Image (cartoon, rainbow, N blue to C red):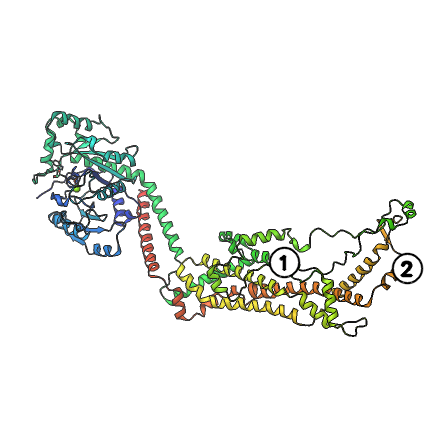
Amino acid sequence: MTISRDPVILSNPALLERVDKLRDLNIGQHVPLPQLVVVGDQSSGKSSLLESLSGIPFPRDQSLCTRHATQITSRRDSNDSVLINIIPGPNATEEHKEQLKGFRNKLPSGSEFRKQFTDILKKANEKMGLRTDLSTGKGEVFSKDVLKIEISGPREDYLTIIDVPGIFRTTTQGTTRDDMTLVKDMVKGYIKDDRTIILAVLPSNVDIATQEILELAKDVDKNGERTLGVLTKPDLVLEPSAQAAVCDLVLNKKRSLTLGYFLVRNRGADGGFEEQSELDRVFQTQPWADLPKDRVGISALKEQLQSLLVDITRREFPKLLQDVNNQIKDCKRELDSLGLPRQDEREQRSFLSHIAGAFQERAREALAAHYNADPVFEQDELRLITQVMNITDVFNADFRESAHSRHFEDLGVPKTPVVAEPKAEPKAEQNADPKAEPVAKRPERPAHRDWEETPAGVTVDNLRALLDKAKVDEIAPQELSELGDIIIPIQEIPKPRDNFTAWINDVHLQFRGMDLGTFNPYLVSISFAEQSHKWGDITKIYMSRVIITLHRFIAAALRSVCTEEQARNHLWYAILDTLVERYKTAMAKANLLIEVEQRKQPYTLNRQFAAARMEARGHRITELLRPTARRDTKQFGGVQYMVSLDDIAKAAAGKPNVEQLQEDIHDILKAYYGLAADRFIDNVFQLAVDYYLLTGPSSPLKVFTQDWVINLEPGELERIASETKQAKKNRSRLGKKIEDLSNALKILKSQDEQ
Ligand code: GDP
Ligand code: MG
């Protein structure tokens, strides 16, 4: 058996050779390469055309009609060889892939291969799990695996052609409607790429109107730049009118295509082994002899294909280069996301140490509110110090508003009506000075209290809204299981009650001794403990909020520096116990501060204590005198109120001893409470929050450090940082792909320089 190989003039073999080298590097699976695809109806002559083009004798056994795609790549090489293997389809299982690996054939020459081809095809069908006997129901009818045949030899051309199963419209032996759709989708998949030349095979002896393939091709190739019509079986068209219809197509007079039609004759079903030149003799007969010579016969088609391939390759070249470049970038990004390789202890330690360093960096930036450092800080969870300060301001406001059990007496508010009864005033005096106001009014209180607005002018209500938005008080089940022992559920703090005076009177009456101008100091102690009994709850709520925020920060920061979930989870559980211990310590410090304030005898060295008491005393005398004060309009520089010395003496004299003592207790308590609250709030923040939770050496933020990594036991290290099988696989796959693509880039660039 000899198959004639027509000499083909290659317009640019170098270009095609380079593309072929890319194919050799398996680049085709990453970026589409220029190629030819033979498509059409079943039995339209696709495989026969392929045989004519490649010289490979496709078997004519109908049971072997194409049921999988076959890629034939031929290339020029000084040595003869044929390599055959199967590329698994996109959805192939691992098991199936393994099975296909077993199918690898290497033959010494094209002619040897041609002899064995039928057998090889049968074996390939078996490996793919295709049904050998269509009448039985065993196995698949079609497969998405691709039989790949690479032929090299000194007389081969650079050509890659893919034979795809034919489209069919009626279900025959063993094929189903699903198979029909499957094949159609397969065809569509093969023709969609811009770098693919579509050889639409149409039998001449069938009405072209029935051939679906031209429609499918038009869908993906709107301008018809890469669709070529190939009419087969001219020898079977005997009717002159049918012949005329075929000639009209070839002359592009009917259903015209941008690239036109070719008329070729393949070997028929009669089993003969005629040479191509013999087959082509049909074109010397009428009516075909009158058709343009460059539109009939295999060599004319082949020539056209080569130049089309070169055109498309040249046109697609810049895009190809870009595709390869983009893929390299994507692979590198993916590889980066896998982190450092970690097969041995050294690599594992380095991997973890790297993450610890990045984590510490995040923590530093988050404490310094240095959010410009990285776009990840757009996540609210990572804006640690801002959240903590918001929580602290809310704590401060809640504390001032609700921490005391009872409101202290507002010394500015007189117990008597603000305005003295006018009728009690002598009329004469009023007449004398009609503008004079009879009684001095208390200056108005400022509308807002200072803790309701932060120095930056943000109101506490705004901050409360921010806490709501950050869901600080909504604890997730996992958080609860991790922190349940430490944090307390957030609850509403009851508002302070009024009637302070009545209460202090009661306390005094229960604990009084022989108090002649003095009282039992224990009284202050007791009253203070009662007045401050909500401090504990408010403070624990504050601490809980900070701890949950910090806990979330640590989790989010770890996510941002360690993208691999398995390693991150192991790491999380490796540090969790220590984190929890440190939250507990901070909580314990806050509790200690609460206990110190509540248990010990109230005392302060703060000089403002005396000042505050004096102020209270001043207020009381002022309020006593206020009803007797008169406005003096004769004074310069503003309004003045005057009292007479007699009134002062009278005012102080009228008060009973008990009332005086109770007032004293109130005033001492009030002066002390204010100072103690200031001191306490500051201490909780400075010690429990700032030092123990955020910046001190035993802050939970300092658990996962590079030192911690250095001191990890090898077993523990292995458990946390060893790579998953999948990651190892991914790493080597990406490594290989980058290598292939980089080689491809080199080839493409050397092409550029030519
Ligand atoms: P496919 O299903 O599209 O791959 O079609 P085949 O290549 O298997 O061809 C189907 C039948 O048509 C086979 O028996 C071929 O021998 C026959 N055939 C293909 N091309 C020609 C041709 O040009 N002339 C003749 N007479 N028969 C042909
Ligand atoms: Mg076929």
Mark 2–mark 1 distance (CA, rounded to whole Å): 45 Å
Rendering coords of residue 486 (x, y %): 53, 66
- The mark nearer the N terminus, 2 or 1, is 1
Going 50% across and 65% down the picture, which residue do you hit? 484
For the C terminus, the quadrant is: top left
With respect to residue 734, does 580 lie above or below?
Answer: below
Q: In the visual, does 609 lie left or right of 751? A: right
Residue at the disc numbered 1: 398
**Residue 531 in which image quadrant:** bottom right
Which numbered circle lies on residue 411? Answer: none
Classify 10 Å Cα crowding around label 2: few (below 14), some (14-19), many (20 and above).
few
Residue at the disc numbered 2: 646
Q: Residue furthest bottom?
A: 514
In the depicted view, which residue is nearer to us: 220 or 681? 681
**Residue 225 in which image quadrant:** top left
In the depicted view, which residue is nearer to us: 683 or 473? 473
- Residue 505 seen in render: yes
- Residue 11 seen in render: no
**Residue 250 in which image quadrant:** top left
For the N terminus, the quadrant is: top left
Q: Amino acid at mark 1?
A: Asp
Q: Amino acid at mark 2?
A: Asp
Q: In the visual, does 564 lie left or right of 169? A: right
